[in-house]
């Protein structure tokens, strides 16, 4: 089945669900973190599906690849912020880190397929 929009991509769907869960997690962060960790974690998380969406419409392989690579970098940033959140005892993040791993595997595969389609 061919995708008609980025919303059809399973990797985008999983990344979007991850964003929603991160928003729920950060709702319980201390108020003093609103302009620091809360904001950084949310922005990095939102960047993942946003870059997948933007890369989806790019026509050249190099452009597509660049956006998927940015999404991968943002996902690693999310991974770190979840480690930090747990270490600061702001919430349990193991389940979310497992979801980050799943999105990372899917994004890696999708990115590799795009690069091979030259």
Image (cartoon, rainbow, N blue to C red):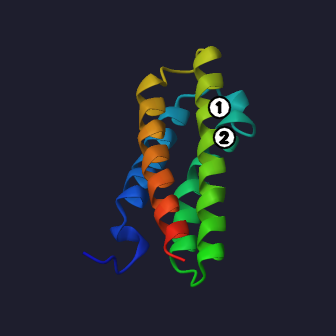
Q: Which residue is the extreme one toward the bottom? A: 59
Query: Residue 91 at what x, y percent from top left?
Result: 51, 21
Q: Are marks 2 and 1 in contact (CB under 8 Å)?
A: yes
Res. 103 mark: none
Query: Residue 118 at what x, y percent from top left?
Result: 54, 77
Q: Is residue 116 above or below residue 45?
A: below
Label 1 neighbour load within 10 Å: few <14, some 14-19, many 20+: some
Residue to which mark 2 is pinned: 77
Residue to which mark 1 is pinned: 80
Query: Which residue shows up at 58% across the image and 29% down it?
Result: 82
Query: Which residue shows up at 53% across the image and 64% down it?
Result: 52
Q: Is residue 94 above or below residue 38?
A: above
Query: Residue 77 at what x, y percent from top left?
Result: 66, 40
Q: Is residue 2 above or below residue 16?
A: below
Q: Quadrant of residue 32?
A: top right
The answer to which of 82 and 2 lies nearer the viewer is: 2
Q: Quadrant of residue 60?
A: bottom right
Which part of the image, by quadrant, shows the N terminus?
bottom left
Query: Which residue shows up at 30% across the image and 78% down it?
Result: 2
How many labels sit on residues? 2
Q: Secondary structure at mark 1?
A: helix
Q: Secondary structure at mark 2?
A: helix
Query: Residue 108 at what x, y percent from top left?
Result: 50, 52
Residues at marks 2 and 1, CA–CA distance in whole angstroms: 5 Å
Label 2 neighbour load within 10 Å: few <14, some 14-19, many 20+: some
């Amino acid at each position: 089945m061919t995708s008609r929009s980025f919303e059809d991509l399973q990797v985008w769907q999983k990344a979007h669900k991850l964003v929603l869960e991160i928003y729920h997690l950060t709702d319980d962060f201390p108020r003093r973190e609103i302009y620091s960790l809360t904001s950084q974690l949310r922005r990095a998380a939102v960047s993942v599906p946003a870059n997948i969406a933007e890369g989806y419409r790019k026509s050249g392989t190099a452009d597509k690849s660049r956006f998927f690579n940015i999404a991968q970098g943002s996902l690693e940033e999310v991974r770190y912020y979840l480690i930090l959140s747990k270490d600061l005892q702001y919430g349990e993040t193991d389940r979310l880190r497992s979801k980050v791993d799943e999105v990372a595997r899917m994004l890696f595969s999708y990115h590799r397929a795009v690069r091979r389609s030259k």
